[in-house]
Amino acid sequence: MKKALILSGGWEGHEPKLTSKFIAQKMEEINYKVDISETLGVLDDINNLLTYDVIIPNWTMGEMEHATDPSDSSKINNFSNAIIDGVGLAGWHGGMGDTFRSNTEYQFIVGGQFVAHPGDIKKYEVIIQDKNHKITKGLDNFVVNTEQYFMHTDPSVTILADTSFSSDTLTWINGVKMPVVWTKEWGKGRVFYSSLGHSLNDLKDENILKLTIQGIIWATRV
């Protein structure tokens, strides 16, 4: 049985308690043991972190201190070292992509950071760029009605799905292609991120849910 840790907290607008519980239930249905932590204190114990196969941040905004030294036992170093050792990292929307805004070490691990959602809730198409990957298996292009994340992204990420921007007011971003789903490596750890999943209702969308669960499975330590 694989073991997952969900960090649930931060800005309440993304419904961290509801979405964490929902994803935990879906993972338990496929034989994961899931722990939900509503405190970041769990990151103080590197030995405990190493018992997990995947960590799922669902903690929009919030604060985590920077490391003062590469060898110290700060939360961010423990988090980083667990993934380097092979623990997977997976998450969605602001819960992983708009987390600990001031912590650049965290952003380096994730591979990107939210900066805006022009037009707020809107319809747009998610274009699957790699239909052969385990994360996107069984998915075709699909339309969503939710926030369209404009992000700063690491050029080393592997893009599995993207979207194209169109704005009546910010005309200079028209046609900009933006990653929606990506993967990367951090040491031995696999990293999966999807910008979809603004609310519980969004995560219940069959395409978004399939993408999210398959992404978590892919990132899980083998």
Image (tube, rainbow, N blue to C red):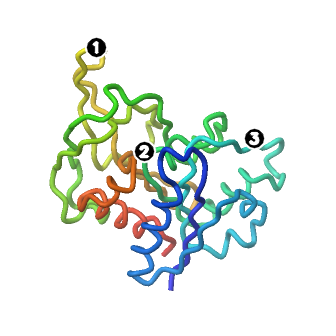
Above or below residue 83? Residue 67 is above
* Amino acid at dot 1: Thr
State left or right for residue 7 relative to residue 143: right
Sequence-wise, which precedes: disc 3 or disc 2?
3
The kind of secondary structure element at disc 2 is loop
Mark 2 closeness class: few <14, some 14–19, many ≥20 residues within 10 Å:
some
Work out whether residue 192 or residue 14 is closer to the camera in this orientation and state it.
14
Task: Calculate the distance from the C-alpha at mark 1 to the C-alpha at mark 2.
Answer: 29 Å
Which residue matches tag 1?
Answer: 169
* Amino acid at dot 3: His
Work out whether residue 37 or residue 154 is closer to the camera in this orientation and state it.
37
Which residue matches tag 2?
Answer: 157
- Residue 143, position in %: x, y? 18, 45
The residue under the point 47% across, 29% down is 115
Which residue matches tag 3?
Answer: 66
Sequence-wise, which precedes: disc 1 or disc 2?
2
Work out whether residue 146 or residue 67 is closer to the camera in this orientation and state it.
146
State left or right for residue 64 relative to residue 203: right
